[in-house]
Each structure stands twice: as C-alpha cells, then as structure tokens.
Image: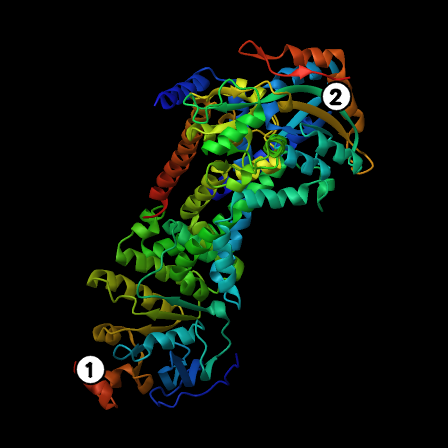
C-alpha cells in the first residue's frame, strides 16, 4: 500500500494542525455493479476522536472497512501513514464473541499480537480492570449482557495497543448506562494517544466525543468540520437537514 | 480439549495396534479357502490341533472358490483349499500352484421345502430331479457367484440337458452370494437349493427345508489342497505351508477330519492318497 | 418372533457370560474404528477447515467431490485397498493385507470424506461470523484455522461421531481387506455376516444388538461430554 506524504489538513480549525494518520482519496467501491462510495475523500489527523456521521447507506461502515483494510478500493487510494495492519483495530456494532471465556477472548487477542507468555497475566489483568469485567473473567463471553460484551470487544481491540481504533456504531444497541461505560473507555483510549474513528448515529454522543466530524451522504463526504462548527453552523445542506432530524433521501 | 482427546485416544490405539501386529508376526500362514469348510466349523476343530503340534497359526480367509483362486493368483495366501478340481488343476498348470492333492470329500444334496412342488423328494437321480424342477418351474435358488458349488451346479444342469440359467429371473434365481446367504434366500422363498452336505448339516436356519435329493455319484464333492508356487509368489511361506499340507494329508490330519461331527453326523470323508 | 426373542437372549448370554471371543471381537472393532476415526479427524479437520476459508478456482468442484465421497460404497473402498495391498498390487511388499492395519486404512478412506465435508460446513458457518473479526485482528491463516477449529470443537464432535457411525457399521470394506480371520481380523460386523451365512440368525442378531448397544454408549458418552463442556464454555 502506498504511504502518503505527511499532508497538512486544510480546514484551518487548528492553528497548529497535527500530522495525518490516514487519508482516503477518490475512493470508489461497488458491489453488484452498484457504487457504494464514489469519489470518497477525507483525511484523518493523528489525534483525537473523529466521528463519521450520515444516514444509513451513506458508506460509513464501508469507509471503516476500507480504513481497516478489510476491503480494498476499486479505484482511488487509501493512505495510511506508517501504520502496519496490526496497528489498526476494529469494533463492530454487534460484538463478535469467541466461544470462550472472557479471559479466553482476551488471551486470544494478546497471543495473536505476539504478547509473550510472561507479560500476558499483567496485561490481562489491566484489560479486565479497564472493562470492569474482573468478576466475570471465567464466564463464557457469549453469556454476557450486550453492554458487557461490547466492553469486552473494546478492550479486546485495545489489547493490540492499536494506533488507529475504528468503532462501528459500538453503542447502537446499548442502554444509556452501558453507552456511558463505552464512552468512558473510548475517551480513555483517546487520552492515551490512540486515534479513534467513531461511526455513530447518536448526535448527543458525537457532541460529547467528537473533535471533528466527517459527514457522509450517498457515498460522498459532504463536509469535514471541527465539532464545534459542525453542530452549530454546518456547512452543507445535507448535514443541516440531518442535524434537524429531517429525512434525507 | 475434546479434539485432543480424540487424537490421543487414536494414537494410543494405533500404538496398540502396532504392538498387536508385531506380537502376531510369529509363524502363520494364510489359507484361501471356501465358505463351506469354514461355515461347517471344520477349521475350528482342525486348526487348534495343528497349532498345538506345529506352533504354526493358520489364518483362514473364507470366500467362494472362484475368489479364493483369484486371491491366490494375486499371491495373497500360502495355501489354497477349495473344491473345484478342474480349476485347481488349471491353477497348477498355469504355474501358480506346485502340487494339488485330494484331501477329503463329501457330497452335494438338493434341499427343498416340505411342500416339494416338483415332486422330487426321495429321488437319487439328480438329472431327473433337475428336469422335474425345470418342467414344473419350481423355484430354484442358485449361488450364481462362480464358486465351486456354483460350477458344480452348472455342470449338473448341463448333464441333465437343461439350460437352467436361461430362466434366470423367473423360476431360476441367482443370489450372487455365498452358500449360507443363498440358503437363507432359498428358505425364505421356498426354493430348491443345491448345497454341500457339510454346510447343510451345520446350518442353523433350516426352516422347513429338508434334503430331497441325495446319493447320486454325480454329486460327489472333492476338496483339494494346493501349495502356492514361490516362483510366482516370492513372499509365500512354502516351508510352513508344506508343513500344514503334510499334516492334513497325514493320518493324524485325516483322522481329525473323519472325527469331526455335527449332530452326530460325519461332515467330511478324508481320502488323501 | 422366536428368532428375535432368541436374539435378545443370545445377546444377553454373551454379555453376562463375559464371552472371551466376544470381548476380543468388540475390542478389535473398537481399535480399528477408533483408530480410523482418529486419523480421519487429524486429516479431515484441517482439510475441511482449509477448504472452508479458502477461495480458489476449482474449489466448488472439490467441495462437491468430497461431499459425494461420503456416499462411497464400503465394498468399493475395500476392493480398492485390496488391489493396492494385495501381494500382486503396488504396495504388496508392505505385507499388510489381512491385518487390522489394512482395515484401519480402508475405514480411514471411508470416514475422512465424512469428517472433512462436515467440518467444511461447520467451519464455513463459523467463519461467516468470525471472518471480519479475525482479519481485523490481522490474524494469519494459521491463526484463523486454529481459532475456528478450536471454537467449533463441540460441533466437530458431531462430525467425528457421524464418521464413527459409518466405520462401526460397515462390513464391506473390512471383510475384503481383513478377510474375517478368526482371532486376527474378525470384528463385530464381519462376525454378524459370518453367523448370518451359517444360518445362525439369532446369534447374528444378538451380535447386532450388542453392536447397537456399543454405538449408543459411545455416542452417549461423547454427547454428554459435549453438553457438559459446552454449557461451561458458551451458550
């Protein structure tokens, strides 16, 4: 994969723009001859939490999968600056739990990422504490509640110590309390220097977490603004309508 | 865990089999023989006696005579003990066997249902009996498997001047299986069956069938024994094979054959020269 | 009716009298079948799993081929193995015909396609669920295979049981390559065939009843193991 040069972000929001971590450039992806994204272009800075918003079918999940290298663009480029595959982690809306205990799920991830046997217990304890799942460490993961499963999925992704963490609507099916726990973990990870890209429909959540917002509609990035301007004075008509709760067709 | 359980058990068993194999690698020979001798229980009586005396284990593969000869032709045996004299002589003439010797005889009989639809009970003329069966189209079950018994049956039809197999599918029914299976079928469909006497006496599922035709000299059933040629089959254990053949042709072996009885009847009559 | 009663009586007598011949035959049946199933699992699990996660031209044909091998007549397998192991055959020098090893080879050929085909189905279903996760964790192919096989372990027990059922029940293959030699290669099914051909129908059916009991015990043992461990590991 070609590595992009370090490019400045031209939104002018930050007086001292950070370096880029990834960039999508004119990406085209189609399935069954229907173009799902067409000319998708946006850049991600190396820090903070970027949320991707937009109606269903806008191409948000697809953009995450392109960033995660689960899909390859048919045209255009996905640049990732100095990221190896193992530096990128992905958490799904519906957490995929291995048919193992909570501990087993985490150990599997630690093993995959080459954490050696001696360091594992310490890392495991840390992850369990972060997820607040110490008391459930021996329970089958698939018997946990939705919120517990998502917490586990999140810390399992963090087990890799990723530089780029991609979250695909991680709280879409959770209650407010469980959502809060996830948001806390996400902010913690961000504070520790992990770049986060969060796809969400929850405008409140985006206001709470986002540093900047990419607004997608029909496979195209209509707007990329800092959070404070996006929510108060969106630049595109589509984003305006979306924020007002109007149905976009 | 379970996956490994499965594998480990398997490996242990494999190891066990290997040990089993080596423990059994002592002196043994393979005799390609017929179902009639095995089903009658003759080998169960003879072989322990021979093993006691010689220390040689005899492993019997009991199949039809045709298959036994085929297997021996493939060198999958050390001794051939069957009952189709002309085939045995051809086997020797073709160089697969060294020598062929008479071992014992019994005779073939026709068994049939108590209702006796062809009206042949008590006769001792096989040609006439077969003619009556064909005339009345009474059901007749044939081995149809190229075995010694089957070959004999075909030659008897031939002598009677009837082409029985031409009626295959109507009253003449080819089972294509062994003696026991054919008897089971014949008894199930009230058909006449030609069988060797030994198998019949030892047979456990006689139903209401009885012997209807016996005593014709044409129904004589000779068993022969052949040692397989080491020229054709380098792996053959000629030394052990000949020990077995010498024993069975000796007075000890012949007496043991004569002594074997089922239900108070002698099944095989030794006639080694 | 009389025969059926006699069969149960025969089975009962054989069991309670701890008949030595019966134990030898049952022992050999288990040795041959369990060895064949174990080897089939060693071959079939990775083969099926590999087929489940791979995409290459001709894959569909291989899948169809392996599935149709599940229906191979045992006699055909037996005959093929016989022709190879026969002294006149290419592997004749191994001197393996009419030994338990030959029977294990024949049954392995019968069972491996069953285990492989069922494994492919099981792993393909699980991979549908796991694929994105494992790829996003940048798992290598080897890791993906081992994760899928381990997490499907309880379903794979069922696959191996299906193979075992086939091996325990078949008579055609072991009869030809084993030769049904008393005290050497006689197993439950060939003994049943022999007693049937001797017209000893009650004894044959009695042995059949014992074979069924044996099969039920093995299945029950493995299924209860599965249920217990499964309850513990996931729902």
Q: Which quadrant holds residue A168?
A: bottom left
* Picture residue at 29% right of the left edge, 63% below the top: A182
* Picture residue at 35% right of the left edge, 42% below the top: C232
Residue B8, visible in the rendered structure: no
Cα–Cα span, label 2 and label 1: 100 Å
Mark 1: give few (<14), some (14-19) or many (20+) Cα within 10 Å. some
Residue C3, visible in the rendered structure: yes
SS class of the residue under badge 2?
A: helix
Q: Which quadrant holds residue A91?
A: bottom left
Q: Which mark is residue A167?
A: none
Chain letter for the residue marked with disc 1 in the picture? A
Which of these two is toward me, A127 or B143?
B143
Q: Which quadrant holds residue B115?
A: top left
B271 is higher (above) or lower (below) than A102: above
Residue C234 placed where, x, y %?
34, 48
Residue B155 placed where, x, y %?
63, 33
Give left or right: position of B246 versus A111. Answer: right
- The residue singled out by tag 2 in the image is B244
Mark 2: give few (<14), some (14-19) or many (20+) Cα within 10 Å. many
Which of these two is toward me, A115 or B84?
B84
- The residue singled out by tag 1 in the image is A243
């Amino acid at each position: 994969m070609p590595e992009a040069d370090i490019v400045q972000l031209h939104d002018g929001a930050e007086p001292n723009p950070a370096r880029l971590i990834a960039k999508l450039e004119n990406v085209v992806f189609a399935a069954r001859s229907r173009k799902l994204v067409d000319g998708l272009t946006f850049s991600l800075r190396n820090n903070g939490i970027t949320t991707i918003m937009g109606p269903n079918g806008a191409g948000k999940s697809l953009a995450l999968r392109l960033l995660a290298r689960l899909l390859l663009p048919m045209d255009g480029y996905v640049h990732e600056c100095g990221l190896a595959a193992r530096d990128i982690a992905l958490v799904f809306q519906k957490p995929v739990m291995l048919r193992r205990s909570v501990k087993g799920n985490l150990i599997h991830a630690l093993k995959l990422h080459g954490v050696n046997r001696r360091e594992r217990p310490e890392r495991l304890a840390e992850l369990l504490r972060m997820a607040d799942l110490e008391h459930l460490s021996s329970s089958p993961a698939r018997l946990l509640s939705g919120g517990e499963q998502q917490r586990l999925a999140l810390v399992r992704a963090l087990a890799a110590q990723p530089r780029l963490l991609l979250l695909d609507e991680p709280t879409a099916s959770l209650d407010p309390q469980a959502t809060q726990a996830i948001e806390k973990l996400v902010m913690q990870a961000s504070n520790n220097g992990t770049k986060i890209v969060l796809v969400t429909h929850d405008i409140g959540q985006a206001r709470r977490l986002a540093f900047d917002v990419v607004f997608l509609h029909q496979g195209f990035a209509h707007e990329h603004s800092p959070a404070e301007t996006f929510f108060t004075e969106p630049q595109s008509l589509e984003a305006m309508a979306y924020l007002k709760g109007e149905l976009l067709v | 865990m379970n996956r490994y359980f499965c594998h480990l058990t398997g490996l242990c068993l494999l190891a066990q089999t290997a040990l089993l194999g080596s423990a059994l690698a002592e002196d043994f020979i393979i005799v390609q023989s017929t179902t009639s001798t095995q089903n009658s229980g003759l080998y169960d009586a003879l072989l322990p006696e021979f093993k006691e005396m010689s220390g040689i284990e005899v492993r019997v593969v009991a199949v039809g005579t045709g298959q036994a000869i085929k297997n021996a032709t493939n060198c999958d045996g050390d001794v051939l003990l069957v009952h189709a004299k002309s085939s045995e002589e051809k086997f020797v003439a073709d160089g697969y066997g060294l020598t062929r010797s008479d071992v014992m005889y019994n005779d073939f009989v026709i068994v049939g249902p108590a209702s006796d639809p062809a009206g042949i009970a008590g006769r001792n003329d096989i040609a006439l009996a077969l003619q009556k069966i064909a005339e009345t189209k009474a059901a007749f079950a044939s081995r149809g498997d190229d075995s010694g018994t089957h070959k004999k049956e075909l030659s008897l039809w031939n002598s009677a001047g009837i082409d029985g197999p031409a009626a295959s599918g109507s009253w003449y029914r080819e089972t294509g299986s062994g003696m026991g299976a054919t008897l089971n079928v014949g008894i199930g469909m009230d058909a006449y069956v030609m069988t060797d006497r030994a198998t019949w006496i030892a047979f456990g599922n006689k139903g209401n069938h009885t012997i209807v035709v016996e005593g014709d000299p044409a129904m004589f059933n000779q068993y022969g024994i052949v040692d397989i040629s080491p020229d054709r089959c380098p792996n053959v254990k000629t030394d052990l094979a000949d020990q077995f053949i010498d024993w069975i042709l000796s007075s000890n072996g012949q007496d043991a054959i004569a002594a074997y009885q089922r239900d108070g009847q002698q099944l095989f009559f030794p006639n080694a020269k | 009716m009389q025969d059926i009663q006699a069969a149960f009586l025969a089975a009962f007598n054989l069991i309670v009298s701890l008949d030595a011949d019966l134990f030898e035959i049952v022992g050999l049946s288990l040795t041959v079948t369990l060895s064949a199933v174990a080897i089939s699992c060693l071959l079939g699990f990775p083969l099926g799993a590999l087929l489940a996660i791979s995409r290459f031209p001709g894959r569909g044909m291989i899948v169809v081929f392996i599935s149709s091998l599940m229906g191979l007549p045992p006699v055909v397998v037996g005959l093929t193995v016989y022709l190879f192991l026969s002294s006149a055959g290419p592997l004749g020098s191994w001197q393996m015909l009419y030994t338990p090893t030959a029977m294990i080879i024949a049954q392995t050929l019968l069972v491996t396609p069953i285990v492989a085909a069922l494994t492919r189905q099981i792993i393909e279903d699980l991979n549908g669920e796991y694929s994105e996760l494992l790829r996003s964790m940048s798992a290598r192919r080897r890791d993906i295979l081992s994760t899928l096989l381990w997490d499907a372990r309880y379903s794979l027990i069922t696959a191996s049981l299906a193979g075992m059922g086939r091996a325990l029940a078949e008579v055609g293959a072991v009869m030809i390559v084993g030769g049904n030699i008393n005290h050497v290669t006689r197993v439950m099914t060939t003994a049943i065939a022999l007693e049937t051909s001797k017209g000893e129908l009650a004894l044959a059916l009695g042995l059949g009843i014992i074979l069924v009991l044996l099969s039920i015990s093995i299945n029950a043992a493995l299924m209860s193991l599965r249920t217990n461990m499964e309850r513990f590991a996931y729902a």
